[in-house]
Amino acid sequence: MKDILTIIFRLTVACLLAGLVMGAAFIATNKAKKHNIHVNEQKVMLSLLGYSEKKPAPDSVAMHEMYRYLVGEGEELTMGYLLPLQDGTFSFVTIDLAGTFVAQTPVALVAEKATEEGERTQAVGAAIGADKLLRYADQTIVVTDNGKRMAYLLPGRFPGFKTFIGAMLALDQDFTIRGLEIMEHEEDPGLGAEIDQEYFKNQFKGKPLETVKKLEVKKTPLPEEYLKALEAGKSGLGAEEVARIQEQYQDDDIYALTGATISSSAVTNGVKAMVKKFAYRLAILDRVLAEQHIATPF
Amino acid sequence: MATDKTNLQLVVNGILNENPIFRLVLSMCPAVGISTTVMNGFMLGIAVLFVQVFSSCTISLFKNVIHPRIRIPTYTLTIATWVTVIDMVLAAYLPEAYARMGIFVKLIVAFAIITMRLEMFACKESVNASFWDGIGMGLGFMFGMMALGFVRELLGLGTVLGYDVLGFKPLLFFVLPFAGFFCVGLMMAFFNYVEIVYKRAKRA
């Protein structure tokens, strides 16, 4: 009996110690980690738009974040968009599933706090009333150049082989894919992990909406010249040559990675769903915004 | 019972006599699953090296207060703590390295080699000896993984460290997990053979 008590005591102390060490490490590193993730995201966004440190984005380019929520009221389900307005305030616009406008509520939110998920959701909840069910769905960044829409950035998550794959997708104003970046994944190294290689990601580049809508995975080997064009950085192919080959394969399906068909089709289907749904939702949102004369900066 | 080996002997022991993969036959899951390329083997080796050294030192430091009946849970707890801490520190201060290594660090918690070294060595020996044993085991594991990775990458993808050497892909079979078993078995046979030849030569 005494033995058991000592065992319990020692194991508890050991667990507490381990917890303390991990907690301390978490507190010490969390800020830096979040900062890194944020910096990385910004870098990825700019590189997808074609800017880099050497070629910074001009001042006329601005990014506007738009957050989509699901709002439940009893049995009714509506979609809510948290939009920035031209005068710097925020507004929450709800649209029902059939695409008709429901309500517009002003949200008391400071721009700096909009990026914090907790504070943002709280502010939205306060604005629409606490009795409604509110669930954060996703985020879209509308990029404008001199007030005109230039591109859309869609951060998204979709199921991969083992767990979720986080990706960032850049679309043109006519929904042609500008680029794809894999932000996080836990696919198998050497097989599924190849999804973050240039020759896979770049296959999505330049595919128009119509092609993306029926995009599939194809299990034939990647043609030699296409591979060279996809890995332009490595093979040293000229920009013109790359553009010509890219165009030639533009309407092709995605060539699957060898030994990782599931990961390949997971990314393909994920991208397909993201683009399709976004194009559909944006059309509805744009119509509502025009009908209700809601002035957004994009 | 303290070890009578010098620090250098402890390190060499981990790499050759008691190589975790080829002699102790421990941690076969990662050896088979991850050793598809030299770089993967190296990354996992580094991660194991750090966790092994930190865990060995911790256990050896606290060896007198660990109740013998809860050794294993305590070891697991120690390893898990170090893995989590290393994971968080890497993510915070070395984001570049983390982007490449993060996936490997998280795998380590369940590695048999680390628990086994804690049980066989660290809980009996001094902190100093445990430190060098940890280094030896880590290096031995890294060596084994890289050797396996070299063979599998060369025969499976035709590359070494990502550079195209052969210019074609001989057998994709070698990159797939089950080929890991064949490679481990064949290389184990090879190392045993080398040992026999060496011993014969020594006797003669």
Image (tube, coloured by chain):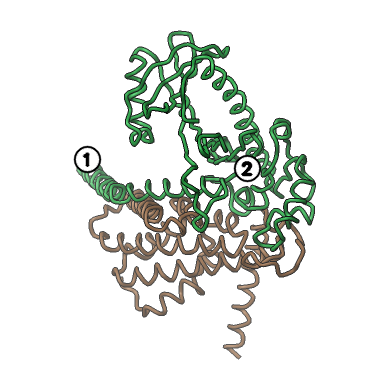
The chain under label 1 reads: A
| Left or right: A40 as drawn, with respect to A207 | left
Hue used for the chain lettered A:
green
Mark sitting earlier along the chain (2/1): 1
Q: Which mark is residue A13?
A: none
The chain under label 2 reads: A
Residue closest to the far left? A2
- The residue indicated by pointer 2 is A178
Q: In terms of image quadrants, where is residue A133?
A: top left
Q: Residues within 10 Å of mark 1 (few under 14, many from 20)?
A: few
Question: What is the quadrant of the N terminus of chain B in the image?
Answer: bottom left
Q: Nearer the viewer, residue A223 or A96?
A: A96
Question: What is the quadrant of the C terminus of chain B in the image?
Answer: bottom right
The amino acid type found where label 2 is placed reads: Arg
Q: Nearer the viewer, residue A258 or B141?
A: A258
The residue lying at 56 percent from left, 64 percent from top is B145
Hue used for the chain lettered B:
brown
Q: Which mark is residue A1?
A: 1
**Secondary structure type for disc 2:** strand
The amino acid type found where label 1 is placed reads: Met
